[in-house]
């Protein structure tokens, strides 16, 4: 009677040296992220100083219907869940701060860019303070999250993200941790694709 070691086979411990181990889980820390943005979406920002980012996800709404007293679940719509990006506030250069000022200045006259003169004349300078109208609706065209290892490249492309919240950190004399910005983004859709680097056969 032979004994089958399911764990041995499941985790590919019997894989020969000449073959690539399949089904390896991805690591959380193995990723890069970047923005394509600007007037013609030709500008590129590598987010190399970020602490974390949530992957895009979605939820579906459903209702229970009665079909001659037989229960049926009917999906009604779906919603994309917000993405949270935590970036370090660096200096020399102030990468994330400069980007957020450009982003703010594209849509609004005021946040992160208000001058002293404007602050003294808020009641008389309308409509200088407020929304701006631009030929392109979106300042950021795509958010690209890349997860790469020696077997494949996984690309997550988030389309037309909008920053809905910019939360600056709290400065504290009793805290020596690094200063961060927490960004919340909504988006209109996303795509996930894999490119195989090594033939697993």
Image: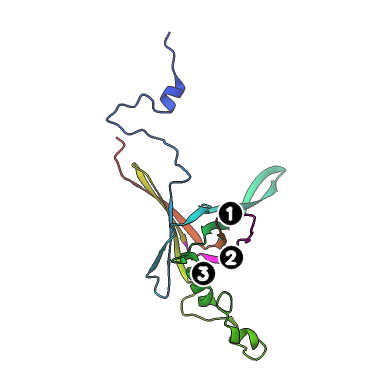
* Residue 56 position in % (x across, y down): 52, 54
Does residue 89 sit above or below 138 in this rendering?
Answer: above
Residue count near mark 2 (Cα–Cα under 10 Å), binned few <14, some 14–19, many ≥20: some
Residue, disc 1: 176
Label 2 residue SS:
strand
Q: Which residues are magenta?
A: 159-176
Nearest to N terminus: mark 1 or mark 3: 3
Does residue 105 sit above or below 19 in this rendering?
Answer: below
Residue, disc 2: 166
Residue 48, image quadrant: bottom left
In this view of the protein, which residue sits in the foreground, 98 or 64?
98
Q: Which label was assigned to residue 41?
A: none
Q: Which label was assigned to residue 100?
A: 3
* Residue 157 position in % (x across, y down): 44, 57
Does residue 44 sit above or below 177 in this rendering?
Answer: below
Whether the residues at callouts 2 and 3 have beta carbons within 8 Å, the answer is: yes
Determine the CA span between mark 2 and mark 1. Answer: 22 Å
**Of the two numbered discs 2 and 1 in the rendering, the one whose residue sits closer to the viewer:** 1
In this view of the protein, which residue sits in the foreground, 87 or 72?
87
Determine the CA span between mark 1 and mark 3. Answer: 24 Å
Determine the CA span between mark 2 and mark 3. Answer: 9 Å
Residue 72, image quadrant: top right
In this view of the protein, which residue sits in the foreground, 119 or 125?
119
Q: Which residue is pictured at 43% across the width and 28% down the height? A: 11
Screen quadrant of the N terminus: top left
Nearest to N terminus: mark 2 or mark 3: 3
Q: Residue furthest top?
A: 1
Label 3 residue SS:
helix
């Amino acid at each position: 009677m032979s004994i089958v070691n399911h764990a041995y086979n499941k985790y590919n411990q019997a894989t020969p040296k000449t073959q690539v181990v399949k089904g390896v889980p991805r690591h959380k820390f193995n990723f890069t992220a970047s923005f394509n943005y600007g007037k013609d979406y030709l500008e590129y920002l590598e987010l190399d100083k970020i602490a974390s980012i949530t992957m895009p996800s979605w939820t579906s709404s459903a209702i229970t219907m009665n079909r001659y007293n037989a229960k049926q679940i009917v999906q009604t719509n779906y919603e994309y869940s917000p993405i949270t990006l935590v970036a370090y506030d660096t200096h020399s250069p102030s990468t994330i701060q400069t980007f957020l000022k450009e982003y703010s200045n594209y849509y609004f006259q005021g946040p992160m860019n208000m001058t002293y003169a404007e602050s003294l004349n808020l009641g008389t300078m309308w409509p200088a303070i407020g929304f701006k109208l631009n030929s392109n609706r979106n300042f950021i065209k795509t958010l690209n999250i890349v997860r790469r290892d020696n077997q494949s490249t996984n690309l997550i492309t988030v389309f037309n993200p909008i920053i809905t919240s910019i939360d600056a950190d709290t400065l504290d004399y009793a805290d020596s941790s690094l200063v961060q910005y927490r960004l919340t983004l909504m988006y209109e859709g996303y795509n996930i694709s894999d490119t195989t680097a090594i033939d697993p056969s």
